[in-house]
Amino acid sequence: MKRLYTYIIVLCCLSFKMAGQENTAPAKEIIFTETKDLSLIMTLTKDSTLEFSYFGLKITDPSPFLKKTSYRRVDYGTEKLVYPAAGGRNFKEPALSITHANGDINTDLMYISHKRVTGMSDNVQQTEIVFRDRKLPLYVYMTIRAFWKENVITQSVKIKNDEDTTVVLHNFSSGYLPIKAQKYFLSTFSGAWAKEMTMEETQLTQGMKTIQSRKGVRTTLTENPSFVLSLDKPLSENEGHVIAGALAWSGNYILNFELDEFQILSIQGGMNPYSSEYFLKKGEELITPEMIFTYSSCGAGGASRNLHDWARNYVIYNARDIRPTLLNSWEGAYFNFNEKKLLKMIDDAHSLGLEMFVLDDGWFGNKYPRNDSNAGLGDWQVNKSKIPSGIEKLTDYALKKKLKFGLWIEPEMVNPQSELAMKHPEWITGTQGRPFTTIRNQYLLDLTNPEVQNFIFNTIDNILKSSPGISYLKWDANRHAESVGSTYLPEKEQSHFWIKYTQGLYHIYENIREKYPNIIIQSCSSGGGRVDFGIMKYTQEVWVSDNTDPRSRIFIQYGTNMIYPALVSGSHVSASPNHQTNNQTPLKFRFDLAMTGRLGMELQPENMSSEDIKFSKNAILTYKQIRDIIMEGDLYRILSPYNNHGYYALSYISKNKKRAVVFGFCFEFQGRTITPLLQLNGLNPYKNYKITELNTEQPTFWGDGLIFSGQYLINEGINPKLQKCYDSIVLLLEEIDETNN
């Protein structure tokens, strides 16, 4: 396979420079980065300005970009800069804005050098570009990483101050990407608690559209730092040119989409500068998180699969580990449990064939027992009234049943009614003389403070040491940051809070991962409040929503998996009527939908009928047999729930295309005249597949047990009988070896 590389093409002779050789020549040239199918091209002008030229499908010979002109008048502003700064003729939203040590508010970045970093894997190429302000010793180091097989390119920068005294950073974006097309259709993800990742498409017009969060914590609960951009026509699943992107950051973020008078769309993303002026002292530097981009010529599906592959290979913590099926205690017990009830739930989890039991909120606090959300948070000692024998008895019992054991924590928050809040009021976020506000009866701990970071690490360390059988942590965070202030940060650096908090969170995770590399951690933040590539560097999965209603989850998981792979998506079967929506749905529908992610259960098994228990056992066993396809396979969305009249269908196909699993759902009544047509893109058209219907004793699909050609399944498709509200179907496709038949 052709390896990833960077061409350095010099105009005078079009010769290739050696990999790793630093270039400082001022002559006009091209910096050319590519993946298997994509090219990113930057042009260096004679005055040492680095301009952006191209991002899209591969152009093997970029030399024409050395001569190409845009006919742009000089007085209308500069060309498309790689990293535009405030000042000069840049009239756009700047990626970088600084007040220099001498009070100068202008910055003009000139190219100094670039080099390819050696020692990376064959699949990853890293290029580092150095910029300097033309007047003052302020440096920007841009890192571009290209992932050959995954067709993903990332950008981040390091800003370093070598001026005489402190400079103030006002804007500090991670990445900047100017795109040229005739029209732009932007799909973004928004919502609220229990309705996360709702997808909405907007045609962009001249001006600025901004996606951002200023919440500090739970930053993805209402908007997500990701997007899908369709060029020239509305978004389609299987065709069209699409750019998708995301920011790997769990704090305040901003994504700007600015369409100018030249019909150029500038995409810019990074940490949100809102109330975050950053004071950079002499010799100090600020490193930004990665901005991730991919490009697809086969619609949204291709962009999603690129991001999913990249995330599994380079981001998600221990992505190759098997995600265990589980029973979570929350909706089955809430705060009302004792040792006897928990032991019975462990028995039931074992009987159902699940692989882990997770004890949720309510297990801690003695002076202020955690019997509801009003008290005890922060006092991480086992509640002796509820669990007199301690967590270790529960873990030992689970292990004897060959179950893993998990535990809920919310270490960033504290109740006012707790020993911790009374002992360390200085650890609580807020400003003296102003009200200390609560959300869900909680204060926010100040993670900018190393003492607090150490307390949280030691708390988790003590829990895990005292109960070595714990193999899973559900890390929750149920409020955002407001009325912020820190007793630790200097008075003049209070605006650093928003960035330092997230850096403090990551520091805690890094320490935990160093000591406990094998423990499974779920990122839960009021459900979908921390669904981003930043947190996935430390966690194996995310809880995409507290809403477990399968009808709601169709839309929530559709949006989530547009960017993030099913591997990370916890999806649970809960009781009917549903506790959040009061919807009543069949158990099969609930299981079929939950099986499209990491399968779990969130109910009280002792309330289930014998028939439901029997069905659940079979469904859990079935899921284990197809789990590898869902976790590692390629996602092909067949029918969108947004525009297919109450139908939703998707498939996962193994990388070698020998196995696939197809899911189909009807969530609105269709009458007797309409059935969906599912065309199964992604299969091998030259192979034959046997279809087996799963999760049913009596198959409903006429093709159950039959063999079809890949061409038939792709071009004609299948028509399962999905007509009644909450009809659903799961089909396993297996390639047939014709030589043995």
Image: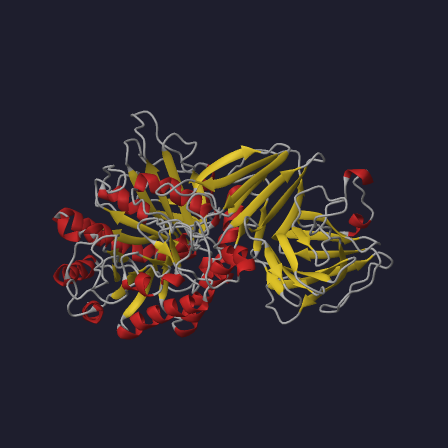
Quadrant containing the C terminus in the rendered view: bottom left
Relative to 26, does residue 572 appear above or below in the rendering? above
Q: Is residue 731 left or right of residue 633?
A: left
Image quadrant containing the N terminus: bottom right
The residue lying toward the viewer, choosing from 311 and 96, is 96
Q: Quadrant of residue 723?
A: top left
Question: Does any portion of residue 568 appear in the rendered image?
Answer: yes
Q: Residue furthest front?
A: 433
Q: Is 66 rendered above or below residue 454?
A: above
Q: Is residue 623 left or right of residue 337?
A: right
Pinpoint residue 672: horizontal percent, then vertical percent. Answer: 29, 25
Foreground: 382 or 27?
A: 382
At which x and y percent is residue 354? Answer: 24, 59
Q: Quadrant of residue 145?
A: bottom right
- The residue shown at (20%, 51%) is 332
Q: Residue at x 26, y 72 (%)?
A: 467
- Left or right, residue 687 beside residue 461: right
